[in-house]
Image: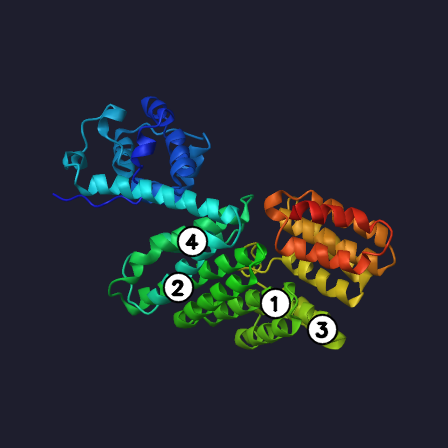
Amino acid sequence: MEYPLSPAALPRALLADPRLDKALQRRDFGAVFALAHEAADISYNKIAEACGLKAERVGKLARGDGAVTTLAAIERIADGLRIPGRHLGLAARPWESRTSASPARMEHDDGDDRMKRRNLLRGALAAGLTGAGAAALTAARQDLDSALTDQPTADLSYWESTAERYGYGYNGKAPTKVLSDLVLDFDDMKPLFTASQTVKSRTRLCHVTAQMAGMTAIVLHDLGDHREAHAWFHTARRAAGESGDAGLHAWALAREAMVPLNFGAPAAAADLADRSRHLAGGQPSAAAALACAVAARAYAAQGNRDAALTAVAEAEQLMDHLTPQQAADTWFGYPEQKHHVHLSQALTILGESKRAYATQSRALELSRSPSLMTRALISIDRASCLAHDGEPEEAARVAAQAFGELPPAYRTGLTRTRALALYRTIRTAPGAGQLRDVLEASAA
């Protein structure tokens, strides 16, 4: 009898790890799951699916909350992770009888290769978005574009839950770590595009592809690679269009508009935002509210005050009518905090300092622990308001502190662009040197 491959099989290198052997001897499956996740990059969702457990329980066990005691559950874990029975005091599992040339052996080899690919890609991305890292990003996107013309097969529930998990943002992870995870997950998705599938499943596949391609583009935008971000947004819009979800298509356009907006092309940003507004229609939605907010910023940057203030008013009206799901704090939602961050930028550019200060304070009040990037951007906006109000020295101090306190992985892309733009407006003012020094230090 042939036994199917397990998506969560532990690679041979990990099976030989003394830490894993010690955890298995104690039947400490929380430690086993944590090692599988940290050392082999096997997600808790994959572990749960392979072992017949709930993802929430796997996560709790990995954090040391609870234990596995029933023989049936232990056997499911052994089979799901392909742990030989002898490691757990069990009889040899049925799948262990295969030869070294069997799928079991190939399964472990695949796991080892995947670990190597992850480590190589992470190293390349950590060194910058050029060379090997850029080549890997381009290859992954081109493979995805090509695959969109094929017919997929497979259960998509796992990938839909994976996209949902990514949607909650960085969660303390460095952008390059999230980027490498996304690209490698696309590599794992390739088999979905190789065989016939129903129209309904094809639609689901295109939908999740659009979500994940869009999130990849968001990370690239945050890292400052606007060219590659545009390319991934194009893929996201193509997949969204094929899925038939106009709201998702509008979301991708609104998100893409933020790329030229943040990198010096407000006219292009306004065009993309207006296309998103048209596609989203007049009904309240996260995409429609985001598109209005981005349009407000773009018009403000162009000096079109009336259009900017009109877009601000529309964004505020839409915000008041969003459902809890539409206002969820994810990359696909439009939470109130994000709303105030966008308005802060528009009002700062327009010189509406009093309103801008209020939106900045409200944005920070709405979350006890806003993301590192969000807090820094709000502080830089506040510094811009101070500069506009005739306090350039205090502006330089606030911006220098906000930018300087960021971890090195976050002192690039968007945050650096904003801090540099402020420095250029106050570079001849007293105290501007402190902002110049932190910018130069980050570039060294």
Alpha-carbon span between mark 2 and mark 3: 34 Å
Q: Which mark is residue 183?
A: 4
Q: Are marks 2 and 1 in contact (CB under 8 Å)?
A: no
Q: Quadrant of residue 197?
A: bottom left
Dividing the picture into quadrants, the one containing residue 196 is: bottom left
Which badge, 2 or 1, comes first in the chain's sequence? 2
Q: Position of residue 436 (x, y in %)?
A: 76, 50
Between 67 and 370, the one lying in front of the other is 370
Q: Quadrant of the N terminus?
A: top left
Image quadrant containing the C terminus: top right
Q: In the structure shown, which secondary structural element does the residue marked by tag 2 occupy?
A: helix
Image location (x, y in percent) of residue 382: 77, 54
Disc 2: which residue? 142
**Amino acid at the residue labelled 3:** Gln
Mark 3 highlights which residue? 302
Which badge, 3 or 1, is on the more N-terminal residue?
1
Percent across and percent down for residue 160 are: 40, 56
Badge 4 element: helix
Of 399 and 344, nearer the camera is 399
Residue hosting label 1: 260
